[in-house]
Amino acid sequence: MNIILLGPPGTGKGTIAQFLQKEHGFQQLSTGDLLRKEAASGSELGKKAEPIMKSGALVSNALVAEIVASNIARLKGQNIVLDGFPRNMEQAQLLERILKEQKLSIDFAINVDSSRETIVRRLSARRQCQKCNKIYGENIPPKKANTCDVCNSPLMQRADDQPEVIAKRFNIYLESAEPLLAHYRKLGMLKSVDGNLSTEQVFKQVAKAIAK
Ligand code: AMP
């Protein structure tokens, strides 16, 4: 089964993808995590992407599609959860082309909707492990302050989780969200969960959505 997670930044897509990976045998394909890894490694691709990501803007569709294509090929044969891609209609079309080439398809998209208020509060509290990418937040604190429970590495606050950048990312999301949601709705592939609820309640809704 291959699924897409849609929704604004900070709505919990990464946490849900990690839940699906841990509890339901999916492989998380997060374009944000992959781009951050490129940036940390200092690769040519990472050097290009890093300033754009810090500003809260989107990196080019072609560049992200290239990363997605190679990772889908790497994960072929496993259940994939796409987190952070597609973000606009051109990316949705690129994804359809990539999947067709690899004789794969998407089963459905889950829209995780949250209010602007929830998002600003959550992103300001969010911390992520620099090494294994595990996400911590207001409802999932680490056992030891600023240290990852899984691999003991230091946690970081993302440069793009600053208030002005959060506002910019949310506005960019709003510009492209509706056509993308309409696209998957029209295909009869859209399911929705309420991202304003507690993490546990959201996980329950997601588990129900994938069981149907
Ligand atoms: P995320 O972790 O999904 O919030 O992504 C962090 C940043 O990575 C975004 O603000 C963009 O700069 C970049 N990024 C991640 N996914 C995409 C995408 N599908 N298209 C363009 N840029 C992306």
Image: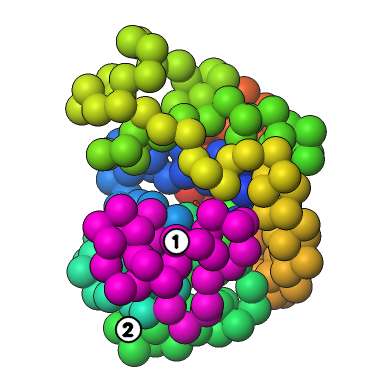
User: Mark 2: which secondary structure?
Assistant: loop
Task: Tell me if residue 58 is in the magenta stretch.
Answer: yes
User: Residue 103 has which mark?
Assistant: 2
List the single residue furthest toward the top. 144
Q: Is residue 91 left or right of residue 136?
A: right
Place residue 78 in its image quadrant.
bottom left
Q: The N terminus lies in which quarter of the figure?
A: bottom left
Q: Residue at x 43, y 78 (%)?
A: 63
Residue 104 pos. (x, y %)? 35, 77
Residue 13 pos. (x, y %)? 53, 45
Q: Camera-side residue: 176 or 199? A: 176
Query: Which amino acid type is marked by label 2?
Result: Lys
The boundaries of the magenta stretch are: 34-63
Query: Which amino acid type is marked by label 1?
Result: Glu
**Residue carrying label 1:** 50
Place residue 169 in its image quadrant.
bottom right
User: Mark 1: which secondary structure?
Assistant: helix
Q: Residue at x 67, y 48 (%)?
A: 165
Q: Residue at x 47, y 83 (%)?
A: 62
